[in-house]
Amino acid sequence: MNLITLIDFTGTFVFAISGMLIAIDKKFDLFGVIILGVVTAIGGGTLRDVLIGSTPVSWMQNETYFYIILSGLPICYFFNTSIHSLRKGIFLFDTLGIGLFTILGLKKTLEFGLSPSIAITMGIVSAVFGGVIRDVLANEIPLIFRKEIYAFACLFGAIVYLATRLILPEPIAMLISILSVILIRILSIKRNWTLAFHPH
């Protein structure tokens, strides 16, 4: 298994769990939990692949994605101990997911010969749109539309990747970039950084 496939599968797994945890929090039935896990895990990547012309989209070419998503069910069962720990779990897995999928989407778009600015956009699409679909289905305001830093963390990590790949080995540049997304997201919550826009 190469590094890109590992990142893709790991991102799929953690995003599936974040979707399932929200579904459990909302008291969805088993089918609803699975559906929310699926759309969270593959929604952003599907939109990215359609936009850049990579069809059939990745999950249609490999049924392993569905096995990975379903493997999140027992993990979610053990997280379902209290609302407090559930919310911590949702944040953790969602943050890991956006870090992994930002760089995956960015790199895949670059490999299609598209410009760095388009690649950054597709990295953000990969990272956040599964969560947008998840939140809409769960009757929540999507995180990308709230004041807390979310898509900006993806933007920061994408720029870090484009810069570091010029001077560092590819795996190290990818790792630094993924960690950058995760770090910005965590610090923004701990220190209450926001992008609030309140014109007078």
Image (cartoon, rainbow, N blue to C red):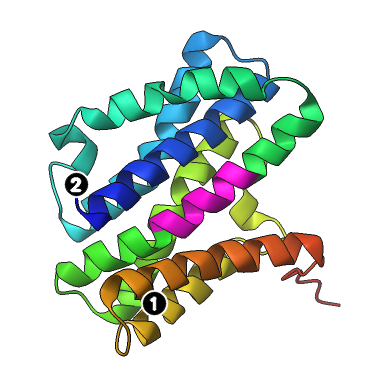
Please check the rendered image and state whether residue 95 is part of the magenta-colored stretch, yes or no. yes
Q: Could you tell me residue 149's position as x and y percent?
A: 66, 64
User: Which of these two is toward me, 185 or 78?
Assistant: 78
User: Which of these two is toward me, 108 or 121?
Assistant: 108
Please check the rendered image and state whether residue 1 is part of the magenta-colored stretch, yes or no. no
**Secondary element at tag 2:** loop
Q: Main secondary structure of the magenta part?
A: helix
Alpha carbon distance from label 2 to label 1: 22 Å
Q: Which mark is residue 161?
A: 1
* Residue 74 in the image: above or below residue 8: above
Q: Residue at x 52, y 51 (%)?
A: 96
**Secondary element at tag 1:** helix
**Furthest-right residue in this view:** 200
**What residue range appears in magenta?**
92-101
Q: Residue at x 38, y 40 (%)?
A: 12
Q: Can residue 180 be seen in this snapshot?
A: yes
Question: What residue does disc 2 label?
Answer: 1
In terms of image quadrants, where is residue 100?
bottom left
